[in-house]
Image (cartoon, rainbow, N blue to C red):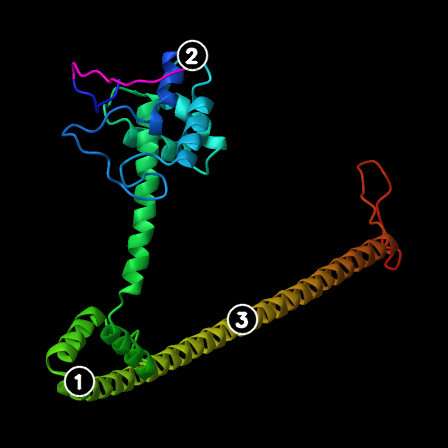
Amino acid sequence: MSSWLKDGEVLMGEGSGTPCSPRQRVFSTPGGYGSPRPGGRGVGVSGRGVGVSGMVQPETMGKAKELFVLCDKEGKGFITKRDMQRLQGELPLSPEQLESVFESLDRDRNGFLTPVEFNMGLGELMGVEENTEKRQMETEEKVDPGELRFTQILTELGADKLFKDQWELGTLWCDLQRDRPELLSILEEVLVHAVSHLQDSLRERESLEQALRRRESDHDRVVRRRLDEAGCEQRRRRVETADSLTAAQEQLETSREELQKALEQLEFLQSNTAQEERSRESLSPTPTVSVRGSTPWTHPYYPY
């Protein structure tokens, strides 16, 4: 069941008490483990969960047992990757993280974990986590005074964000402090001049960028003004064209009205003329036409 027992090896031990099931016997093994790793060496991982001799601490074992029972609700005596998902509500881990933990504990790659594998793996993980935290603390405590001094100098000069290769400068500073401390003052002067030059360059660049931004702003303002002027000119021309068109339409309407009046007057004159002609025709005498056998026609003023 476990990768730490070779084929054919048998775990021997003595004890007293009432018989129990194999699953209970696993958790009753002193220290929570039954066999060492191949080679006869203990785990040897120190930390919060694993002791110096590779034995899991009681509080870690109890917590591991609770988690195992929580996963193995069916009492199978082992847990699968799907069973591991039941810890999502108990531990601040996502399903992907729980799956990663299961794969790290399943060293046999057989798809399930026995109580021994679960307890041992969980203890080692907790121990590694503790050791990592301790190493980080030890690293922070072992800061080189020379490097600290170099960092302080850069901060005082305002150059802690100017140099991209601070690591190389820090190495050079520490080497000089160890081998040639008399050259530290020279390096410090060089740093002062370099920082001053960099700051001047940065100020000049900032000034140029501001000037460029001002020119761009002025150019944009001129372009907008010209566009506005062009737009105003176009609007003025459109207004003038519209006014001219309106005036022409009004003039055309006036001419049409005058022409209509002239036509009406002409019709009136023509009507009067026709009426006068009819009146004259009605007032003039009608001539008599002689017919054979009738009295000859004589002019009233000339009887002969």
Tell which circle, 2 or 1, labels the residue nearer the N-terminal end: 2
**Residue that appears at 42% across and 12% down:** 18
Residue 70 part of the magenta-drawn span: no
Helix, strand or loop status at disc 2: loop
User: Residue 304: in sight, yes or no?
Assistant: no
Relative to residue 67, is residue 134 drawn left or right? left
Closer to viewer: mark 2 or mark 1: 2
Tell which circle, 2 or 3, labels the residue nearer the N-terminal end: 2
Closer to viewer: mark 2 or mark 3: 2
Quadrant showing the N terminus: top left
The residue lying toward the viewer, choosing from 26 and 263, is 26
Tell which circle, 1 or 3, labels the residue nearer the N-terminal end: 1
| Residue that badge 3 annotates | 235
Q: Position of residue 298 (x, y in %)?
A: 85, 51
Against 44, residue 76 (above or below) is above
| Residue that badge 1 annotates | 184
Label ID, residue 18: 2
**Residue that appears at 40% across and 35% down:** 60
The residue lying toward the viewer, choosing from 21 and 253, is 21
Residues in magenta, as a range: 7-17
Helix, strand or loop status at disc 1: helix
The residue lying toward the viewer, choosing from 138 and 72, is 138
Residue type pointed to by label 3: Arg
**Residue that appears at 43% across and 14% down:** 75
Q: Position of residue 10 (x, y in %)?
A: 21, 15
Q: Residues within 10 Å of mark 3 (few under 14, many from 20)?
A: few
CA gap between label 2 and label 1 equals 76 Å
Relative to residue 171, is residue 51 drawn left or right? right
